[in-house]
Image: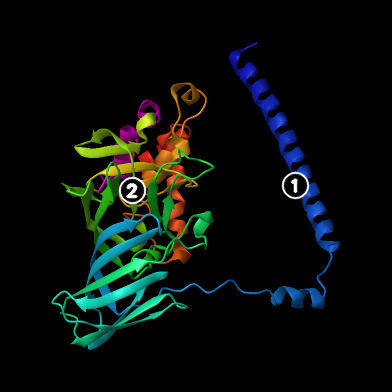
Amino acid sequence: MTCYESENRTYHTVWTRGTMQLLNTLRLRLRVIAFLVSLALFMPVALPAQRQTQSLRELPAPQYIPSHDFDTQNIKLDLRFDWEREQALGTETITLAPLLTNLRRIELDAANMTFNSVKLASGVPLKFETDEAQEKLRITLDRVYQPNDVLNVVIDYHTNGVTKARGIAGFGRGLTFIKPNSDDPKRPRQIWSQGETEYNHYWFPCYDHPNDFTTTEIVATVQKPLIVISNGKLLTTKENKDNTRTFDWKIEQPHATYLTSIIVGEYVAIESNYAGIPVISYVYPNELTEGKVTTSRLPEMVKFFSEKTGVKYPYAKYAQTMVRDFGGGMENISATTQTDNMIHDARTELDQTSDGLQSHELAHQWFGDYVTCRSWQTSGSTKVLPPIFKQCGTNTVWVTTTFFTAM
């Protein structure tokens, strides 16, 4: 047998097998087509009444971007707290510029508050009225203002206690006070805010929609040993003679008001950094060891997301603070609020970690805070990527990591 004859027989065998495979494929396709045709012939046809019922389905609630005739440039809050009445006592200075000519009145979102006075920073008093049903504070200015003007309006107010109405996902609206009680005498003393979606106007007046960005500064005075954590950079901590301390936090990057936050409580800081940026986890003093175990990978997550997005973490610090009775995490800008249930000891870490929660909220610092939806109708754009990044950050879905590496 020559080499050629052997190759020819092999070719004939392959050709025969290929022909059989092709015929089998054609038979299978014909059977599928026949099945689909019979299915279509015997499919029940919708009756006219059924079609009419389907056409009368209610449309979803309309979504819209609220109009506003001014641009908020800065909000500064000076706060104290009445723990007995669960109230914030505040002075707000809001800086704004008209977006239209001849602006004579401004309207702010405000709920569950009492207003003592409204005036310009120069001292000129302004007339105002509240609309509790619409949750509005309407202020009449002393004259008409033009787009090249800048106004500083000072509002003296206090909140009217904690509202019983619940917000998104069962969270509170505005401020929540945590205090010891008879059932739990060791319950910590805390105050925390929850702004998403539009609930920060329950503790300070503002344009409470995501399509207007502003810088913010929070100056808050609390009793020792409590501390205050808020957005941006801690400018000063002042020791007062009445056993209180005043904390001054300011963030220079404009952001949507729902991302503004405050936490008051007794904490110790677990400090690290990424590229010179402080990365801090605030935990309970009696959980310092467990806190170090739980949050040990956080700086690596900041590094990972900075490199994969191509955008270095953009704020003065990243902090996450544990609080009681919080149902998860909230990506407040540069200052995430986390449930205190996320802290684990070393033994538990062998079975499970809270890396998923930590990386998810961290990812929102890019998708949600740095890039924010214009309206809540498009909020899905800020909710899709953090779960993907969470998987990347916890090294569980490396195909996703490859995807973002290739972007």
Residue 60 position (above or below residue 356): below
Inspect the magenta stretch and tell me whether residue 345 lies in it.
no
Region of the chain picked out in magenta, as a range:
288-314
Q: Position of residue 317 (x, y in %)?
A: 25, 44
Pair 2/1: label in front: 2
Tell me if mark 1 has few (under 14), some (14-19) or many (20+) residues whose alpha carbon lies within 10 angstroms of its own.
few
Residue 294 lies in what quarter of the image? top left
Farthest residue, direction top = 1
Q: Position of residue 236 (x, y in %)?
A: 16, 48
Most foreground residue, 142 or 187 = 187
**Whether residue 312 is visible:** yes
Quadrant in the rendering for residue 254: bottom left
Residue 170 located left or right of residue 202: right
Q: Name the residue at 77% across, 49% down.
A: 32
How would you rate the neighbour count of disc 2 (Cα within 10 Å): few for under 14, some for 14-19, many for 20 or more? Answer: many
Q: Callout 2, which amino acid?
A: Val
The earlier-in-sequence mark between 2 and 1 is 1
> 116 and 377: which one is in front?
116
Which image quarter is the N terminus in? top right
Q: Which residue is mark 2?
A: 264
Q: Which residue is mark 1?
A: 29
- What residue is shown at x 45% (from left), y 53% (from top)? 383
